[in-house]
Amino acid sequence: METLNVSGLVKSYGGAPVLAGLSFELRRGECYGLLGPNGAGKTTTLRCTLGLTAPDAGAIRLAGLPVPARAREARMRVGIVPQMDNLDPDFTAAENLLVYGRYFGLPDAAVRARIPHLLDFAGLGGRGEARINTLSGGMKRRLTLARALVNDPDLLFLDEPTTGLDPQARHLIWERLKQLLLQGKTVLLTTHFMDEAERLCHRLAIMDRGRFIAEGSPRDMIAAHIEPEVVEVYGEPGETSAAATNAATWAREEAAQFAKRVEVTGETAFCYLAESRPLLRHLAGRQGLRYLHRPANLEDVFLKLTGRELRD
């Protein structure tokens, strides 16, 4: 089945461009990530591709059908995990799945037969009769994922699926999503967790101000856009201003002889290097400074391309 193909997507609100000609496609059986700071256009992209918002220009084919012309029909073949849980508190966990199945025209008997499997998949076996207000945040999120699978879709839209969850719940959802990918399902994922994107995405795009500024596999993007090693240098614990001064002064006066690139944020100097050993030897003998040595990651790429300033 054809998954999703987007070409030249444009959308403006009040004359201000939100999407500026996006083009991308999902390959069957892959997880494709959309990353970007707040206001980059991720949610508008999802709404347009689902036919919930009409674009100003561009072509969209979802599940082989043109959107928005046949958006309702296309959505019947898609599973959606929205950013905010919207489970019905008047129903039990099992009833939420049953009622949702009716939206797809599925017979009650067919949905009832699937409910035990869906609950087990979500780690909610034995919780079918539980009321929604008795479930934890992680349980609700997992039930929302199970609900998205009621119609056995080949394509899943996941909008920040693990926001607000504890590490145990996040890891369980990651495990379940990997199982779905192994089953051949296709996933479009938005997330603010860079480690989540590195773990799950075969390919991803970083977008800002309605445009793609980089696209590729996580490994290829790290190799293309960032030095391979990072040393974070910061002051000893104590007064914040003193720690910040120590790191900033060191970065201004000494870091350039070791690092290809240095960024100072707050009390931390981020040193990006091709070879870290000379800097580590230097820091080992310094008083008043601490450091952390690590490989470069997707978050480094994201911050380099989109900046470190706060977005509202």
Image (cartoon, rainbow, N blue to C red):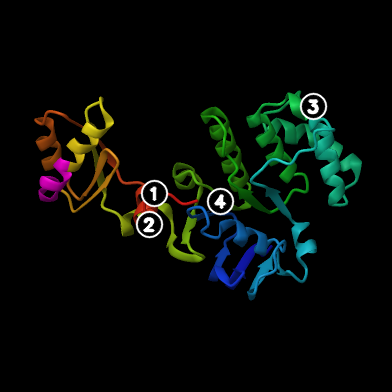
Q: Circle 4 sits on which residue?
A: 190
The mark total stands at: 4
- What kind of residue is marked 4? Thr
Residue 255 in magenta stretch: yes
Q: Are marks 3 and 4 in contact (CB under 8 Å)?
A: no
Q: Circle 3 sits on which residue?
A: 131
Distance in Å between CA atoms under marks 3 and 4: 29 Å
Q: Circle 1 sits on which residue?
A: 298
In the rendered image, residue 222, in percent from the top left (x then y), is placed at 35, 53
Disc 3, SS: loop
Label annotation for residue 42: none
Distance in Å between CA atoms under marks 1 and 4: 14 Å
- Corner quadrant of residue 280: top left
Left-right relation of 131 to 286: right
Closest to the observer: 293 or 209? 209
Residue 236 position (above or below residue 174): above
Disc 1, SS: helix
Q: Nearer the viewer, mark 3 or mark 2?
A: 3
- What kind of residue is marked 3? Arg
Residue 230 position (above or below residue 35): above
Distance in Å between CA atoms under marks 3 and 2: 44 Å
In the rendered image, residue 178, in percent from the top left (x then y), is placed at 56, 42
Q: Residue at x 75, y 58 (%)?
A: 75
In the rendered image, residue 149, in percent from the top left (x then y), is placed at 73, 45
- Corner quadrant of residue 248: top left
Q: Are marks 1 and 4 in contact (CB under 8 Å)?
A: no
Distance in Å between CA atoms under marks 2 and 4: 17 Å
Quarter holding the N terminus? bottom right
Residue 287 position (above or below residue 177): above
Label annotation for residue 221: 2
The magenta region covers 249-258
